[in-house]
Image: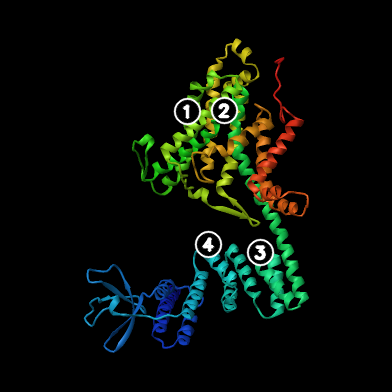
Amino acid sequence: MVRLFLIQTFLWLACGMVAEAQDARHEIAAATLLKGEAAQIKALNGLMGQADDAIFPLLEAWRKDRLFLYEANGKTVPVLLVGAKDKEGMQAAERIDTGKPLVDEKGAAIRLNAEDLNAVAHSANLRRVMKAVLDLTDLASSEPAKRRSALAAIGQAQQLEKLPALEKRLAVEKDADVLAALHEAIALVRLKSPDRAVKVAALKELEQIQSLASTDFIATVEKEAKLAKDENLAVHAHTTLLAINRHRSVVDFGGTLFRSLSLGSILLIVALGLAITFGLMGVINMAHGEMIAIGAYTTYVVQNVFAAGLALSPFGFSVMIPGLHATGWFKESYFLFALPLSFLTAAVAGILLERGVIRFLYRRPLESLLATWGVSLLLQQLLRLTFGANNVQVGSPSYLSGNWVVADILLGWNRIFVIAFAALIVFGVWLLLTKTPVGLLIRAVTQNRAMASCMGVRTERVNTLTFALGSGLAGLAGAFLSQIGNVGPSLGQSYIVDSFMVVVVGGVGNLVGTIISGLGIGSFDQFVQQYSPSVAGALTEVPWVGGFLQNLAQDSAVFGKILVLCAIILFLQWRPSGLFAVRSRNLD
């Protein structure tokens, strides 16, 4: 008996699902045959909130004039033409009410020509109702992201006629994020209510959920309340705005702090190698930025190798790099292969630079600056000739493309990965310098090259290995930057000056100083760019400040760089050796 009851229950549910699908199709088919716009609108309103997969394609086809009326034997049948056209322009016809092929008396499928049929007419009002139906259909989607998107659109539209359907969803919605979006959408729609008490309740709910998207709508309510001389409502709206703006300030601060950590992490990776090579050899390597670009372009090449391949034209010669045509998780893993290859490619480029140019310029800062600046221009042109002058795009794998939202602060997975990997690199460099024989040799040569050479240390080999390490770290930074922005031949030039500032402020050759200054300069730069518009607004109120400074403050990026540079200059006047000066026994 229990088994029989379960079978009957299952059959009843299955029949109910089929009946619901048939009802939606039948309702749309019946609406196409009705006379008069009002009757059709009433019929379509009956579809509000239904979760039938047939609703979306049929209404979309109606809006795009792809539903037709087929007349035969005194009957009119609404049909949808599907499939490719043959030589005579004929297509397969599908009945709207059943979703099955249109057949004649003998059961043979009928093919029709769209030019011989009358399309189902529609008006602007009908299309508006169709859009409302489609918006509410997405509320019953199985994808939470699609439901949240539909709720955001409904809330922004503030259409009171959709409020009953939204309130019904409160009883069935289970996803916490979607439920929060549903409460926000309901409150936004209620702001349009003619009932003052409903508006006040909606304002209190928006204040409680700290809705950042509602600022403009609440400001409109405040303005309308002032025009209507409703002081109580205006006070409620103003109080809600103040609370949301306070929350926005916290969100902006948290987002700026997160972005500053990611930028500081990249500067730190770039500056680590620069600090070691500069402290070891006294060489100002202006081509260090091109090592960043080499690492980024290596990531770009690896991405294309995992896909369909890459066609290059260096010096006018066509070179085709074959692709693996990878799919699925293997294609997504390209970045895991790109990281070590970026390090190795930049390290090899660093070895060639050190062996070909740098080794002749040890302890000659001015000559090394000029020589490496020339190498920098040469490498930039070489990248342009190989990959083109335009920037290229490196796609992020799925595991780096998403984000987390914590208290309305957007935390991108790619930036979280950069911060975590930078911490891992710092730990690895610390282990290398303090716990390995190679690190001991590097520290010995850094503190006293002559004495280390007398003790049998092969300083030239140490120089080469150290330069390879520094260049490889820059290549890793380039791989990270490819996940944040576009890749171009001049990519490294945006970071080389900041990297030198990190090295000088932290103390040449000091790992701890490099970490602190890298994170500090990156954070200061981001915070200045975030709040410089406020500074510009303050400057406009000062009568003796010239228009040049006011306009400069409005360009947040330039103004931020100038303030950072001024702060560093003042700091170096106080501590010329940086935060942590490297102590040695040299008398000079």
Q: Decide: marks 2, 1 in contact (CB < 8 A)?
A: no
Q: Which mark is residue 145?
A: 4
Q: Work out which quarter of the rendered image holds the C terminus and state it.
A: top right
User: In which quarter of the view is residue 420 placed?
Assistant: top right
Q: Which mark is residue 474?
A: none
Alpha-carbon neighbours of circle 2 within 10 Å: few (<14), some, or many (≥20)?
A: many
- Find numbered disc 3 in the image and state the secondary structure of the residue it sits on: loop
- Give the mark, 2 or 1, whose residue is nearer the N terminus: 2
Task: Say which of 319 and 466 sits in front.
Answer: 319
- Which is in the foreground here, disc 3 or disc 4? 3
Mark 3 vs mark 2, CA separation in Å: 50 Å
- Which is in the foreground here, disc 2 or disc 1? 2
Mark 2 vs mark 4, CA separation in Å: 48 Å
- Which is in the foreground here, disc 3 or disc 2? 2
The amino acid beneath tag 4 is Ala
The amino acid beneath tag 1 is Val
Q: Which residue is mark 2?
A: 285
Q: Residue at x 32, y 73 (%)?
A: 81
Q: Which residue is mark 3?
A: 211
The spot of residue 255 in percent (x, y) is 65, 51
- Give the mark, 4 or 1, whose residue is nearer the N terminus: 4
- Find numbered disc 2 in the image and state the secondary structure of the residue it sits on: loop
The spot of residue 461 in percent (x, y) is 53, 18
Alpha-carbon neighbours of circle 1 within 10 Å: few (<14), some, or many (≥20)?
A: some
The residue furthest top is 454
Q: Which mark is residue 348?
A: 1
Q: Work out which quarter of the rendered image holds the N terminus and state it.
A: bottom left
- Which is in the foreground here, disc 2 or disc 4? 2
The amino acid beneath tag 2 is Asn
| Residue 391 shown left or right of residue 270 in the figure | left
